[in-house]
Image (tube, coloured by chain):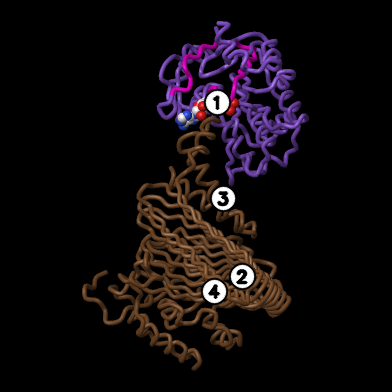
Amino acid sequence: MSVTAAPALPFGAALAAARPGEPSWLAALRAAARERFVAVGLPTTRDEEWRFTPVAPLGKLEIGLPAAPGTLRPEALAPHDFDPAWPRIVVVDGRFEQALSRLPDSAAGIRVLPLSRAIAEGVPEVEKHLAKTVAPEATPFSALNAAAFTDGLLVVVPKGADPGQPIQFLHVATDASADALLAPRLLVVVGEGARATITESYLSLTTQRHVTTTVAELVVGRNATVEHIRVQRETDAAWHVGFTAVDQARDSHYRSFALSMGAHLARHNLHAHLSDENIETLLYGLSLTRGEQVSDTHSAIHHDHPNCNSWEVYKGVLDDRSRVVFNGKVLVDPIAQKTDAKQTNRNLLLSEDARVDTKPQLEIFADDVRCTHGATIGKLNEQQRYYLQSRGIAGAQAEQLLVWAFAAEVMTEILQPTVRKALEADVHARLGEMTG
Amino acid sequence: MSLLQITDLHAAVDEVEILKGISLTVNPGEVHAIMGPNGSGKSTLAQVLAGHPSYEVTGGSVTLDGEDLLEMEAEERAWAGVFLAFQYPVEIPGVTNAYFLRQAYNEIRKARGLDEIDPIDFIDLLEEKLKVVEWGPEIMERAVNFGFSGGEKKRNEILQMAVLEPKLAILDETDSGLDIDALRIVANGVNRLRRPDSATIVVTHYQRLLNFIVPDYVHVLAGGRIIRSGGKELALELEEKGYEWLTGPEAAVAS
Ligand SMILES: Nc1ncnc2c1ncn2[C@@H]1O[C@H](COP(=O)(O)OP(=O)(O)OP(=O)(O)O)[C@@H](O)[C@H]1O
Ligand SMILES: [Mg+2]
């Protein structure tokens, strides 16, 4: 940061960027979102929703969009490619990179496109669904993203279709993103009885500070099945604020796994709206933090119809002076009888100085429901440690095994086996660093 | 030379003295049974031998093959060949039995200056050891003791013992909670694992286990002391008369 005086408007340079050629509905959407962001500004820790997650310092930085996307060697992405046969949309420093991407043939009406191209082509689902599941006014950052997003992913899987392979979205920050705003956006529309597996990864091939604000909207049709895996492993200098929301129709299944292991400060809002009967929503997550990292998850599950199940398990492993924040809101409307909702947040402290702020927030207005929650913050179990010792496994070996066991329990919830194995290896390696 | 030599052992937990001067000599090839009323210190003795950090040894000595056992950490005792089958085995969700056993096996090999076992060879070894407890391979993919029934946990301890081949095995009420078939399986397992150079200490409340695992010596522990030692017939006598005979007022009068 070279500037000392605070800019008049946070992210002013990013918001001022011209976007020629966009359709008028989008221009209007952006203008309204910009106005909203200017009106509300960045939240402070006096705001209950941001109590433990100080993002206000961002207002002091002069932040624009990256001047031009950086260049990178294609091999640099190999470790982050779950399978070289799967479709892949790569966005570098906020811009779609054709040369690094693998777009599938649009068979059976399935569309997998960079969002910029979908907008330019006038794909009807974009205008119909964009910024509906995550309203620009939801949080200051969703307003910022709507006003400033540069590119991203559109997936449309029509009624009854199945892409057969997971669809990968890979967002890469390079040196060109230093002190810049990266604002990618995903829109996934899965039709009745259709299936999709989506991976969404954020990584940095730089150690420079950048600010990423993401929005992912998923519209899951009747009896559709979606697995969504989100991986945030940006540089320890990055600020990452993401918002994921899913709107589910009757009989649908949505399963998500969010791995957060990067960024200086990471915030993820995950909202599920169970807007009809007989819906299943499964939310799993794992945060690994060290140094001064902060990882904040704010989930909100809204049951507004009867006979739905939501199941949420989030875990955190913390080292050094890092922090995890978990806020789990479950809202059950009076009409949502027979709701079965369970929420669990478990945290493992590897250091005396790490800290967890966890808060369940159950708002239950129906009487015939089963809703439970539990939160734990603890150190390694001494009985388990002694049991291992008595079998000859001690010291760092025992610690690694127990910490891995803690994380592995939730990782088994990733159904896609290739993704699960790859992420298990990454988590195993990181935990090795944290306990070694 | 004796395998295990316990001399006037005193131990305390939370500054309460539990073991009040225990002496015991165990030679290679022997089976010793330790019996005694609830709360008499049997598990304490077992845990002190295994190296539980909560117990403080306040006096006496213990040697294994002439080496000072009390100087060693719990893992060093495992490396030296001590194995305790826990009265209450610990659950470890997230770690499969297979992974756990391989790690334990390799750690002990490493400590003895041997290379890690080839994973394929280990699968073969497991297959052999599973036969000892009459189990199928499915158990290896389950998390260690997690969701196991009480009897399954005990059986899993014997499986671990079969894999680790200890020099000194201490079974703390491994027979409690076992149905009659499981009891036979566990006892057969222990008998199959006996070697001329190894020894077993069996803590039990019941004569029925000692019908299967026939002890060379039986010791009665009460109030933190061994108050009587004898041959296998002592267990039968206890079964008949109870402990009152040794610990109650009549015993006091008799002595
Ligand atoms: N932390 C402690 N503080 C005080 N006393 C303790 C503590 N832990 C154990 N004890 C006591 O030590 C004594 C011996 O316990 P131990 O578990 O060794 O008995 P045991 O002979 O194995 O009994 P059981 O047959 O019931 O298994 C008991 O009276 C027990 O209450
Ligand atoms: Mg006991």
Give the magenta-colored segment's residue range. Answer: B17-41
Instruction: Give me the C-alpha separation between circle 1 and circle 4.
Output: 57 Å
Residue A200, placed above or below residue B10: below
Which mark, residue A408? Answer: 3
Please give the residue where the numbered disc 1 appears in the rendered image: B39
Colour in which chain B is drawn: purple
**For residue A285, side relative to residue B204 (left or right):** left
Chain A colour?
Answer: brown
Label 1 near ligand 1 (CB < 8 Å): yes
- Do tag 4 and tag 2 residues touch (Cβ < 8 Å)? no
Label whose residue precedes the other's in the sequence (3 or 2): 2
How packed mark 4 is, by other alpha carbons closer than 10 Å (few <14, some 14-19, many 20 or more), is: many
Identified at 44% across, 60% down, the residue is A358
CB-based contact (under 8 Å), mark 1 and mark 2:
no
Real-space CA distance between mark 4 and mark 2, rounded to the nearest whole angstrom: 27 Å
Q: Taking A384 as reference, is A174 left or right?
A: left
Q: Identity of the amino acid at label 1? A: Gly
Q: Position of residue A303 (x, y in %)?
A: 59, 73
Secondary structure found at label 3: helix
Residue occupying image coordinates x 73% and y 30%: B133
The residue that label 2 is drawn on is A367
| Label number found at residue A245 | 4
Looking at the rendered structure, the kind of residue marked 4 is Ala
